[in-house]
Amino acid sequence: VEEDAALEGLRMEARDALCAAADDGKLESVLADHKGGEDEALEALRMEARDALCVAADDGKLEEVLAGNQVEEDAALEGLRMEARDALCAAADDGKLESVLADHKGGEDEALEALRMEARDALCVAADDGKLEEVLAGN
């Protein structure tokens, strides 16, 4: 009980000190000084990042890193395309693709027809822009 009373006394003193500092402007001044330091540190960090980016842009490292990421993404995407193509070809060769399509044919004739039309359109576009010939020549 004595500790509670002492703690309550400290709380009251702290409250009174904060209220007095708020009333006479000292609290605002202390907080502004503290915030100013954070703003300066943040601005220094921004300037350091900007300088590093400018140096990397000037010496070509920024472009190299960005181009390297694109090459990796393109290679990964091409790998996925090849895997999908191989899986579809294997399923078509061993009859699994036809079997799966036949199993789903029941209530999905319209969806299958829409898919056929979409595939036909994609093939027509690829034939028109030369990509189909390029892909077929690559195999």
Image (cartoon, grey):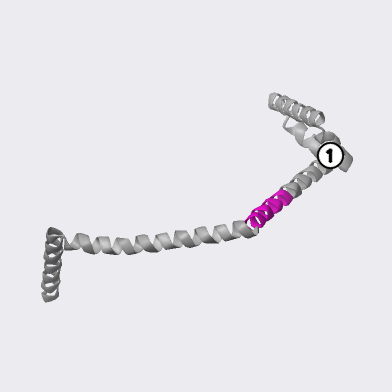
Q: Kindly identify which residue carries mark 1.
A: 135
* Within-10-Å neighbours for mark 1: few <14, some 14–19, many 20+: few
Quadrant in which the N terminus appears: bottom left
> Quadrant of the image for the C terminus?
top right
Residue 6, picture quadrant: bottom left
Residue 24, image x, y percentages: 12, 61
31 relative to 25 in the view: left or right = right
Q: Which residues are magenta?
A: 62-76
Q: Position of residue 27 (x, y in %)?
A: 19, 62
**107 or 59, which is in the foreground?**
59
Identify the amino acid type marked 1: Val
Q: Nearer the viewer, residue 86 or 58?
A: 58
Q: Say whether residue 70 is left or right of residue 98.
A: left
> Which of the 4 image quadrants contains residue 38?
bottom left
The image position of residue 127, as x and y in percent, is: 82, 30
Which residue is outermost to the bottom? 2
Number of marks in picture = 1
Q: Nearer the viewer, residue 109 or 117?
A: 117
Query: Left or right: 134 with respect to 38?
Result: right
Please tell me whether mark 1 sits on a helix, a strand or a loop. Answer: helix
Quick check: 13 left or right of 66? Answer: left
101 in magenta: no
The quadrant where residue 134 appears: top right
Q: Nearer the viewer, residue 102 or 64?
A: 64
Residue shown at the point (36%, 60%) measured from the top left: 39
User: What type of secondary structure mainly makes up the magenta span?
Assistant: helix
Residue 37 in the image: state x and y as whole percent: 33, 64
